Amino acid sequence: MTIAAPMPVSERSASARMTPPSRFGDKAFEWLTLGMALVVILMIFLIGWQLTRGSSLAIQKFGLRFLTTSTWDPVAEEFGALPFIYGTLVSSLIALLIAVPLSIATAIYLTELAPLWIRQPIVSLIEMLAAIPSVILGLWGIFVMIPWLRNYPFPLLKKLFGWTPFFTGPILGPSMLAGGIIIAIMILPIITSVSREILRSVPNLQREAAYALGATRWEVTRIAVLSYALKGLFGAVILGLGRALGETLAVTMVIGNTPQIAASLFKPGYTLASVIANEFTEATTEIYLQALVEIGLVLFGVTIAVNLLAQLLLRTMTTTSTTRAVQ
């Protein structure tokens, strides 16, 4: 019968020192971060629940008709949110059409083309634009932007595109187009800054490989940089869209604040956020107050729906690009 030799003392102490450490710290950190993530989700549900509770009377009275009618008459206590939904979506779309090309082009210039000595001054100016309060931009819009638009760009647009329904009618100044332009100015620094950081994160190996194949600078930017950063750039646009949907004060000062649905961009408009800011302190009846709270609920729902739609489009774009790469 063989008897195992006893383990030397030095080996026993070494094996004791090599025992696995406690997992308590890892588990505690995991549960802590999970709790923080759940708090964010809980806050979203609590906001939706509070808005629903605060507008229960309006929901019971108007139902889905609140979303499909255009009447907004506090005296007769008849309320419909359709003009405000229309104004919010159209002004945000105008802002994106103006801001996205400018922002991405600026980010490309700062990342790929600009000399080093000029990059930081331009970045600083863009960051300063983001720091300007919305009320200051609104005052600038009233006293500077609207008179200039009324005298020069708007008549030119009417002369060139007056045959379309989008640029017809009298030029008053405060309008849906003016609201979209002021929103574009406000979201431009956000999209530019995020797009610049995304383009900077593209590995240099991407660029070097394209140059090695004989690509020009434009081809390198288009093929190696933009295609690689497409998903991130789309995310930057979604961040800008989120800011555009909820912008309030500056838009209220230049959009005209008229609850109507008009094809002409020269006509005044109204947004969901603007009607809440303008009329919340004037709500003298319970149904009027709850209708405004329901406007907030609609804005909350529109923001979530637009972001979900953007995520769906992003997933579709990613799947399509992956399929093409495999083929």
Image (cartoon, rainbow, N blue to C red):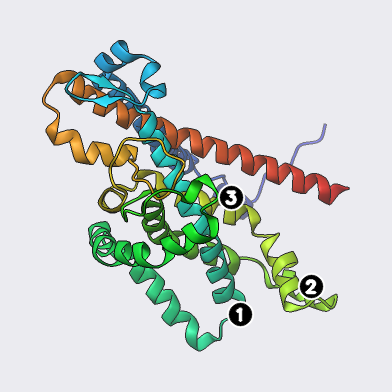
Along the viewing direction, whichever of 239 and 78 lies nearer the viewer:
78
Q: Residue furthest bottom?
A: 117
Q: Residue furthest right?
A: 327
- Image spot of residue 13 (x, y percent): 56, 51
Looking at the image, which residue is at 42% across and 47% down?
Answer: 91
Which one is nearer the viewer's eye here, 36 or 12? 36
Q: Secondary structure at mark 2?
A: helix
Residue linked to disc 1: 113
Q: Which residue is mark 3?
A: 18
Q: Quadrant of residue 199?
A: bottom right
For numbered disc 1, what is the local secondary structure?
helix
Determine whether label 1 and label 2 are within 8 Å by CB.
no
Callout 1: 10 Å neighbours few (<14), some, many (20+)? some
Name the residue: 22% across, 41% down.
Answer: 277
Which corner quadrant of the image does residue 320 belong to? top right
Label 2: how many Cα within 10 Å (few below 14, some 14–19, many 20+): some
Location of residue 220 (image quadrant): bottom right
Q: Earlier in the sequence, mark 3 or mark 1?
A: 3
Q: Give left or right: position of 285 versus 181.
A: left
In the image: residue 25, left or right of residue 132: right
Quadrant where the N terminus is found in the figure: top right
| Residue that mark 2 sits on | 210
In front: mark 3 or mark 2?
A: 2
Q: Amino acid at mark 1?
A: Leu
Q: Image check: 24 left or right of 269?
A: right
Q: Is residue 140 visible?
A: yes
Specify the amino acid type for callout 2: Ala
